[in-house]
Amino acid sequence: MNMIEGVKVKKLRVIPDERGRLMEILRSDDELFEKFGQVYMTTALPGIVKAWHYHKNQTDHLVCIYGKARVALYDSRQDSPTFKEVNEFIMEPSNPFLLKIPSLVYHGFKGISEVEAMVINIPTEVYNYDEPDEFRVDLYDNDIPYDWRK
């Protein structure tokens, strides 16, 4: 797979002990850290797709903490060396990684486990309720070469 320009994957380390587990997700001294906006959780029920959207200013940092999600990205940036590339990632706690999604890259995810998929996002910007930095296209009626039905 040709990684979309600006997309980064950081393998996460889980540290277990007799009490449970600890997993650092994003640190301010990480190479891929830009700045902090907020932290939120989003979920998808089994078989449900939450897509397609992009941000003009915000970079997202996703990690799946429960269930299993299929994340898809599409590079619509005409000046990008990976213009029109699609990337797909399977995210789940048994193989934890942080996925950095740059601005202007369409993205979404589908719950693909028998339980609700829970994803943490650490965007670089605070959500603006009056003027959201979120731009959507229809799930299926678009020019993105990706089929969520698979």
Image (tube, grey):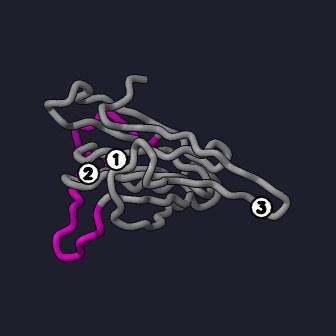
- Which residue extends farthest bottom? 130
Q: Which residue is mark 1?
A: 107
Residue plotted at (85% across, 60% down): 18
> For the residue labelled by badge 1, is the local secondary structure a helix, a strand or a loop?
strand
For residue 127, above or below residue 119: below
Q: Earlier in the sequence, mark 3 or mark 2?
A: 3
Earlier sequence position, callout 1 versus callout 3: 3
Give the residue at mark 2. Answer: 54
Q: Could you tell me the amino acid type at mark 2?
A: Tyr
Q: Which residue is mark 3?
A: 20
Residue contact between numbered discs 1 and 3, judged by CB atoms under 8 Å: no
The span from disc 1 to disc 3 (Cα, nearest Å) is: 32 Å
- Other-residue count near label 1 (Cα within 10 Å), few / some / many at <14 / 14–19 / ≥20: many
* Residue 6 part of the magenta-drawn span: no
Q: Nearer the viewer, residue 138 or 96?
A: 96
SS at mark 3? Answer: strand
Q: Position of residue 89 (x, y in %)?
A: 49, 38
Q: Is label 2 in contact with label 1 (beta carbons under 8 Å)? A: yes
